[in-house]
Amino acid sequence: MENGANRLRLEGEAILFGFPSTKTVLTIRPRPTSWRASGAALRMAGFTVLAGAVAIVPPHAPWLIGSLVGGGILARRRWIERYTLESVTGTCPKCGAELAVKPSRLRKPHPVMCEACHHEISLTFEASSLDL
């Protein structure tokens, strides 16, 4: 595991059942509590303001509740994002195509869709130093 410019590089494997796994390198970014808390608070505040605006549209309660629940869901998603997967260097175990990811919350194992063969691949990595 290397650390450079607030990014970590982890070695891992791309796994697809029935095929030999391939080596990958994951680039992740640790997210501080301040980034997570401010993002969660902004999402919840935005949806609370939206709730006040949409509550005047009949039927009143569903729009109000939907806005508050939506804000809560998006705020929770930001709060639990301790690490962001930014990129993957590696190939698909089935077809050998380069894997590509959009920046998203890192999960273990992290699912990735191969754009060439459309199989869902699991990225596994040693997470002993990460608190996932």
Image (cartoon, grey):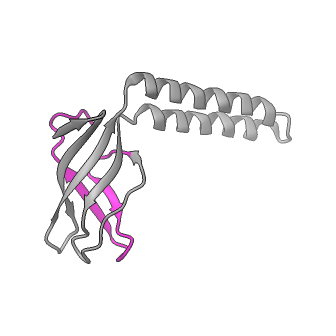
Residue 117 rendering spot, x and y as whole percentages = 34, 77
Answer with left or right where residue 41 lies relative to residue 108.
Answer: right
Residue 2 rendering spot, x and y as whole percentages = 18, 39
Looking at the image, residue 2 lies above or below residue 13: above
Is 36 within the magenta? no
User: How many discs mark residues in the rendered view?
Assistant: 0
The residue positioned 28% from the left and 46% from the top of the image is 27
User: The N terminus appears in which quarter of the rendering?
Assistant: top left
Taking the view exactly as shown, the residue that stands out farthest to the top is 34
User: The C terminus appears in which quarter of the rendering?
Assistant: top left
Answer with left or right where residue 102 lies relative to residue 18.
Answer: right
- Asked which quadrant contains residue 73, the reply is top right
- Asked which quadrant contains residue 95, the reply is bottom left
> Is there any visible trace of residue 108 in the rendered image?
no
Return the residue nearer the eye: 74 or 89.
89
Residue 101 rendering spot, x and y as whole percentages = 38, 57
* Extent of the magenta region: 105-132
Residue 4 rendering spot, x and y as whole percentages = 25, 36
Looking at the image, residue 81 lies above or below residue 89: above
Taking the view exactly as shown, the residue that stands out farthest to the front is 5
- Asked which quadrant contains residue 129, the reply is top left
Is 108 within the magenta? yes
Q: Main secondary structure of the magenta part?
A: loop
> Is there any visible trace of residue 60 in the rendered image?
yes
Return the residue nearer the eye: 111 or 67.
111
The residue positioned 22% from the left and 44% from the top of the image is 9
